[in-house]
Amino acid sequence: MSNTNTPPGHRKRDTSQITGHEVLAGVVQVRQGSLKALLWQRARPPHPNRWALPGGRLGPDETVESSIRRQLAEKVDVRELTHVEQLAVFSSPGRVPDKRIVVTAFLGLIPCDTDPELPDDTAWHPVEALPETAFDHEEILLAGRERLRSKLSYTNIGFALAPPKFTVSELRDLYSAALGYRVSATNLQRVLSRRGALETTGETVAAGPSGGRPPALFRFTSRDLQITDRFAVLRPPG
């Protein structure tokens, strides 16, 4: 006969609750000069009317990445992701009321020249001024923002926020919005060019009404994620 007694000082393990596995994505884009996140508004409990990250249950025949790409395409009509990466696993036992749900979270980036058509219950919200969110979704989203900010320092991940061609001023505005502070266009061009991440297209845009030298167009040398400087750190001025 097996011994079912619980050893002193130990809690008996509850095996009655099955652990579920979800995938969620913090999808961000620079829109109207600020970094914004894609959220949908819940209609049913728990947390009705709160805003949530897109995602859902992991299918039995899916990898976590194929699952999040499918769900973003099906649920919020987002197919134009230029970069997706696994962020972290969030497994706090109480993160979802009355259920045991482990989530694999992703960071997804959309270039600024893309405007996906969204369902009525889905909208873009400034990351700096989020509405009331469900569960631990704000924590997940802010972790994604910090991952993005970190990688802007030592990789070419800016390609995932930018259109195929851009002026240095336009790229400066994208970096400033993502980092949360003003970036020097001259320094940004110098650093990215020195690292081999940026090149001129040989084209210019039309000069403005005040005349002057037409701004040159640039592009990233690669639209795949690459480490360009392992020891670089971008910091706010001052």
Image (cartoon, helix red, strand yellow):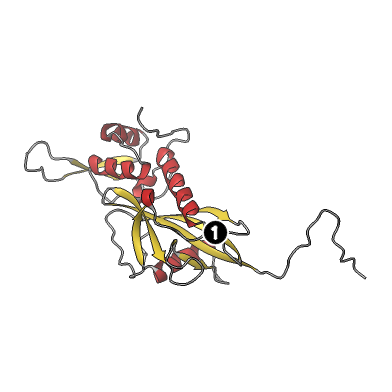
Q: Residue furthest top?
A: 238
In this rendering, is residue 67 above or below 91? below
**Residue 223 in view in this figure:** no
**Mark 1, residues whose alpha carbon is within 10 Å: few (<14), some, or many (≥20)?**
many
Given residues 206 and 124, the one toward you in this image is 124
**Quick one: SS at disc 1?**
strand
In this rendering, is residue 139 above or below 48? above
Q: Quadrant of the N terminus?
A: bottom right
In this rendering, is residue 85 above or below 20? above
- Three-letter code for the amino acid on which mark 1 is drawn: Thr
Residue placed under numbered mark 1 in the picture: 104
Residue at 54% in and 59% down: 104
Q: Is 216 placed left or right of 95 in the picture?
A: left
Residue 67 percent across, percent down from the top left: 50, 66
Given residues 76 and 200, the one toward you in this image is 76
Residue at 42% in and 43% down: 149
Residue at 47% in and 72% down: 44
Q: Residue furthest right?
A: 1
Residue 52 percent across, percent down from the top left: 44, 62
Residue at 48% in and 48% down: 143
**Residue 193 in view in this figure:** yes
